[in-house]
Image (tube, rainbow, N blue to C red):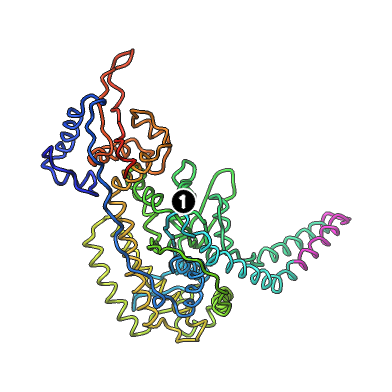
Amino acid sequence: MNQKEKPMAGATVHELQKNTNTINDVTYYSSINQELIGDPDTFEWQRPEEFEKGLRPVIKLTSGMLPKAYRDFIVDVSYRLQVPLEYIAVPLITLTGSLIGRELKVIPKRKDTSWKVVPNLWGIVVGDPSTKKSPALTAALNRPIRYLENEISKHYSEKYENERDAINTVIKGLEVKKCKATTIQEARNITMEIRKHKENLSSIPSKRQLKINDVTAEALMELLSENPQGLLYYRDEISALLDSLNKKGYEQKKTILLESWNGDSPYHDHRIGRKSIKVEHACLSIVGGIQPEVLIQHISESLRKKGNDGFIQRFQLMVYPDTAERKYTDESNNDKAQETVYSILNKLTFLDYRSIFDSLESKSGNDNIIRFNSEAQKVFEDWDKELIARTVEMDSCMLGQHISKYESLLPSLALIFHLTDICSENFEKNISVESLKLAIQWCEYLESHAMRLYDINEDYIYNVSKSLSKKLRNEDNDLPTPFKVADIKRKGWSMLENTEVIKDALEYLEQLNWIKSVKPTNRGSKGGRPQGLDYYINPNVKKI
């Protein structure tokens, strides 16, 4: 590389390498700079270059893209909270899919009945701190779930509590009678009778649980076994879940989550010394919020260190919307809109799916099945052929892997949108072309957000460097002068825990005149190799 040539603004080390004849040119460029630096007291500091790269544009979610029955509620809450529509829509749609769960599956293809799609989804809302992700998740999830849990408790009490209490009363009476038995045969007969009543007791279904917030691998298997229709795993800050899954001892939990993504996979745990657990149909939805820097770090680390297991790509409802300047609001709740949404969620929770969809060839084994109507079927086939062609061209990159999962996302969204219409206006029972076209709009919209996030990841060193630049500008960073790579690593700053990543970021910042590096001349009292480069901060960075 020509020494006088300025680095490209917003370029990554990879991009710099592509613009040289050999990879060694980048190393040569750095070594030449180090030779030119000389004595730190004689530095001639140039003006630091600013970071110019912005976020990739995304499709904006509009009210016309929202399910009709949910539209007024989402618009009302997002306006009163002053948050993007996505902050309400994504968690609410994820919740709806989790309530349907395994109760109703889509057969997307005309002839192939072996492929069935369960509408459980993984959603993640990406936003900077203080953008009101938590209040939005509370409005879209916590409050509706509390309402539904109360309804489930009432329903369960009316249907099963009296029966359970009656059986328990009989068992207690028999146990007292057994203690008073006068012969061994009489005691045996009573024991057999007790066992029979306990079997009846175990056949009574447990009360349905809708969500979990944090759980061990063993408890998760128990809960999935007790709730075959599906569960919602909700974390306000989903970074806590992602962090834990990369720790030693959490491998089994991550495996269970991966297995539960398609909503219908069995998972059997056999361990010596403890009870074996069988989950015949693991079905789990996941939803939460996260900061962009944290998510990008997980995406990058999954490729750098842990290997790409496809975990992040399973978050099909992954959105990173632009946020507008908030303004003061003081409006009354739209109670009618909320009542409509809560009513739909309640119907989907207690709906007898088999009685409704039985006439539409809705049984395949023990499954309730729904299909596209004839017009929607043709639209799906054309869309799916185009998707397959596009993802083949994208080879095996993370974005391509992410978008390839839209093949199941589209029928899931179409089913969710269609059922909200059925519950509110009693439309046709097969999935309508209107619901499918709305789902296609969502897939196009979601792809633009996925492209934004994976685009940020492609420029990972750029983003790490930008994050580090903010630390260097802060006079309270407590870095020594000069500082070394190890000084930054000890800080434990986000995105700056990996030694090689820190070195790449420092090299990038040096190319933008934010810092200068010096080869230390002292080798220490014991001799040996110098202990890494010394770095000096350009005093002009505080003026930017």
Residue 351 appearing in the image = no
Structural crowding at the residue carrying mark 1, measured as other residues with C-alpha within 10 Å and reported as few (<14), some (14–19) or many (≥20): some
Q: Is residue 9 left or right of residue 205?
A: left
Q: Residue at x 47, y 66 (%)?
A: 327
Q: Can residue 219 be seen here?
A: yes
Q: Residue at x 67, y 70 (%)?
A: 156
In the image, 480 versus 145, the foreground residue is 480
As displayed, is residue 135 above or below residue 372? above
| Residue 472 drawn in magenta | no
Q: Which residue is mark 1?
A: 239
Query: Residue 196's quadrant in the figure?
Result: bottom right
Residue 141 position within the rendered picture, expressed as x and y whole percent measured from the top left: 54, 65
State which quadrant residue 23 falls in: top left
Q: Main secondary structure of the magenta part?
A: helix
> What span is colored magenta in the figure?
165-185
Coordinates of residue 233 in the picture (x, y in percent): 52, 59
